[in-house]
Image (cartoon, rainbow, N blue to C red):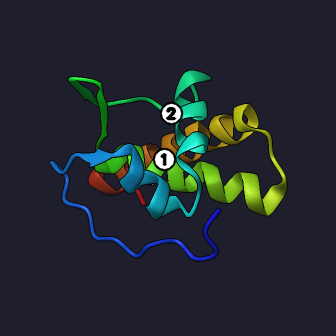
Amino acid sequence: MRDEPLSVVVLDEACLTVDQVARACAVHVDWVTGHVDDGVLTVTAVVGTHWLFSARDLQRARRIRQLERDFDAGPELAALVADLLEEVGTLRARLRAAGLA
């Protein structure tokens, strides 16, 4: 495991490899592949034998990693909390768009 995450700026249409996601999350590639195998993370595309991830996938992976680290949460719990945080963000954006926030 790496000590410090790689600082990255990701464009919405960018596709990241497993290695790039692992570096951005400061984890081993096995962490990423294990979370994909467990259904906690999803792959945006498969090119040949290579998995590709979107910027949204990276954001989710970083959030899950942070929850696991900061709260000693298991992958499934971290994924559930990440889902709930994403939903809250979506609802807040809808409220702002409707002028109610």
Q: Nearer the viewer, residue 68 or 23?
A: 23
Residue assigned mark 1: 60
**The C terminus sits in image quarter:** bottom left
Dot 2: what SS? Answer: loop
Considering only vertical position in the picture, is 25 above or below 51?
A: below
The image quadrant of residue 66 is bottom right
Dot 1: what SS? Answer: helix
Please state which amino acid type lies under the numbered disc 1.
Arg
Q: Is residue 61 visible?
A: yes
Contact flag, marks 2 and 1 (Cβ < 8 Å): yes
Q: Nearer the viewer, residue 65 or 101?
A: 65
Considering only vertical position in the picture, is 6 above or below 50?
A: below
> Which residue shows up at 66% across the image and 34% down it?
80
Q: Is residue 92 visible?
A: no
Q: CA distance from mark 2 to mark 1?
A: 8 Å
**The N terminus sits in image quarter:** bottom right
The answer to whether residue 64 is left or right of residue 52 is right
Q: Position of residue 44 (x, y in %)?
A: 29, 31
Residue projecting furthest to the front? 49
